[in-house]
Amino acid sequence: MSLSENPEHVEKTLFSRWLRRGRSWLRSGTTGVVSLVYPPSCVSCRAATSEAQGLCPQCWSGLSLIERPYCERLGTPFEVDLGPGLISPAAIADPPVFARARAACRFDGTARELVHRLKYGDRTELALMLGRMMAQAGRELIGEADLIVPVPLHRFRLWTRRFNQAAALAATISRQSGRPCAPQALTRVKRTKQQVGLTRAQRADNLQGAFKVLPAMRPQVEGRRILLVDDVLTTGSTANAASRALLRGGAGAVDVLTFARVVTEA
């Protein structure tokens, strides 16, 4: 710093630096105190862990991560690697409305427990860890996406549940990737029955006309490649219905990213 600078300016600069350091020390000290009072624990079973927002070794081993080789359309894992670009018989026999789907893990064990706690247990903090895992698993789709859109809840379901888990996951992925998120781009205009217990055909009928891109939202969607975000991909009925509505609303293409997906063994 030059001695010729204005003394008042020098004093303000030094004070500003001192203030930033003080805030940093305060944050560090607060974090240390919180760690002593509330030691980090597993987000699934609450066992002690070395870091916050993580899983203990036992719960981590209960995650069935999905990695290549998998179907390039549906994201379902293959038992044998027969080369890149393979499409599963299911995707050929019944092509999905969306272009591609990816999931971080299978919907069983620890993954099932985490989804249920996020969805029904008001454990909204889980969206941070699950969203980060999704951002890693779907980095290829995210890199090509123009806009992130969560699968919406109907307003009555949102009122009873108090939050939309898909929107929470989409917000985390947006922060991780820097891609814009548009929670209002897609609207659930039909109050549907719970999907649990319904067959594939019943799920598709239940979701007929459930989603719509409202006229005010079309400029956000038109011509864009959309990344549709949800917690679980089961039969694909919800993803197909939401993707169809986005395409009708002018989207150029739709990819799907979920935390977990049901995998039916052949």
Image (tube, grey):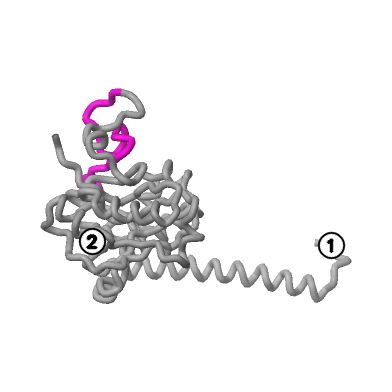
Residue at 34%, 46% in the rendered image: 98
Point out the image quarter for the C terminus: top left
Residue that extends furthest to the top in the rendered view of this protein: 82
Q: Which label number is shown at residue 2? A: 1
Mark 2 residue element: loop
Q: Earlier in the sequence, mark 2 or mark 1?
A: 1
Residue 43, picture quadrant: bottom left
Q: CA distance from mark 2 to mark 1?
A: 55 Å
Question: Tag 2: residue type?
Answer: Arg
Location of residue 122 with respect to 134 vertically, above or below = below
Question: Tag 1: residue type?
Answer: Ser
Q: Using the rendered image of the protein, determine whether residue 97 is visible from the camera's viewpoint.
A: yes
Q: Is residue 153 within the magenta segment?
A: no
Q: Is residue 69 within the magenta segment?
A: yes
Specify few, some or many for label 2: CA neighbours under 10 Å numbering under 14, 14-19, or 20 or more: few
Point out the image quarter for the N terminus: bottom right
Residue at 36%, 62% in the rendered image: 212
Residue at 12%, 52% in the rendered image: 199
Q: Nearer the viewer, residue 228 or 94?
A: 94
The residue that label 2 is drawn on is 46
Location of residue 9 with respect to 226 vertically, above or below = below
Location of residue 119 with respect to 95 vertically, above or below = below
**Closer to the eye: label 2 or 1:** 2
Residue at 36%, 50% in the rendered image: 134
Q: How many marks?
A: 2
Q: What's drawn in magenta, residue-wise?
A: 60-82
Q: Are marks 2 and 1 in contact (CB under 8 Å)?
A: no
Mark 1 residue element: loop
Residue 66: image x %, image y %?
28, 40
Residue 258: image x %, image y %?
31, 51
Q: Which label number is shown at residue 196? A: none
Q: Using the rendered image of the protein, determine whether residue 175 is visible from the camera's viewpoint.
A: no
